[in-house]
Amino acid sequence: MAHLSTSCGPKSSSKPGPTSISTIFPITKHFQLPTVSSSQLKMAAVSTPTIICSCSSSSSSSSRLSSKQAHNTKQQQQQLLFDPKKRFFEVGIGLLASSVIALTPLEADATRIEYYATTADPPCEFSFARSGLGYCDIASGSGVEAPYGELINVHYTARFADGIIFDSSYKRARPLTMRIGVGKVIKGLDQGILGGDGVPPMHVGGKRKLQIPPELAYGPEPAGCFSGDCNIPANATLVYDINFVGIYSGNRK
């Protein structure tokens, strides 16, 4: 079967006729038409050459370009999404003081961590402050207390009361740096780490479990919402496992 490479022009409305000799042997400026035998002519009459189109319309090229650009954009978004320097993930969906958390579709998918914990927690009996905050020390730290208004590093796991984990710094493989005591995180975390109202302060190296009632968390407002789908429902009681890793080294002396 003959193979031709040709440019793509507008389609002809006329019906295709029999294959001509010039189809098999294209005539060019410096091409001498060879002698063709009768057997070759018979073969030409019944053969249909395969046309290899070497070009495409501008619309299909644009379509492929747009598709490639969209793919590259999606890859860039995903790289940014999982960049550990990205502020959203440094803060954490379950720590922000505000219930108004704007999420992109990619962020909403990435932060919707809903699965049952499989690791057993150490036995812990909560003590309760007058505010309703429950606290229980798993390990007492031997370091300094958290300085009011300064940045500290903590690892944490956040769960609903039924044990479902919805956020964790361990999933991001690095502790969270947060400013403590100035309303940057939910009230229950400020009180649970700094202490006050009968709650002892945490020390560096300490591990504490906190049970935070809705009024010290997000209250009647759902949090972490995108298009009506919220990670944290209204009036949710939240349970945090806090590991006080240390004081942020970048604090002003």
Image (cartoon, helix red, strand yellow):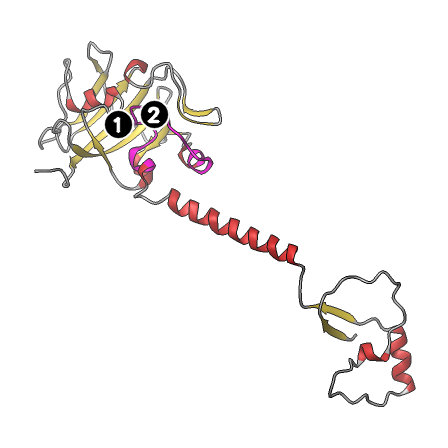
Residue type at mark 1 is Asp
Which residue is more in the foreground, 247 or 10? 10
Residue type at mark 2 is Arg
Badge 2 is on which residue? 159
Query: For the residues marked 2 and 1, what is the alpha-carbon distance in whole angstroms?
Result: 9 Å
Could you tell me which residue is drawn at 24 percent across and 26 percent down? 184
User: The magenta stretch spans which residues?
Assistant: 88-109
- Local packing at callout 1 (Cα closer than 10 Å; few below 14, some 14-19, many 20+) is many
Where residue 62 appears, as percent x and y from the top left, is 60, 55
Where residue 130 appears, as percent x and y from the top left, is 20, 9
- Sequence-wise, which precedes: disc 2 or disc 1? 2
Task: Judge whether 105 appears above or below 43 on screen.
Answer: above
Task: Judge whether 120 appears above or below 161 on screen.
Answer: below
Task: Judge whether 146 appears above or below 79 on screen.
Answer: above
Residue contact at pointers 2 and 1, CB within 8 angstroms:
yes
Helix, strand or loop for disc 1: strand
Judge whether residue 134 is colored magenta: no
Instruction: Say whether residue 247 is left or right of residue 227.
Output: left
Where residue 95 appears, as percent x and y from the top left, is 29, 27
Could you tell me which residue is drawn at 43 percent across and 49 percent down? 76
Judge whether residue 100 is colored magenta: yes
Badge 1 is on which residue? 241
**Image quarter of the C terminus:** top left
- Local packing at callout 2 (Cα closer than 10 Å; few below 14, some 14-19, many 20+) is many
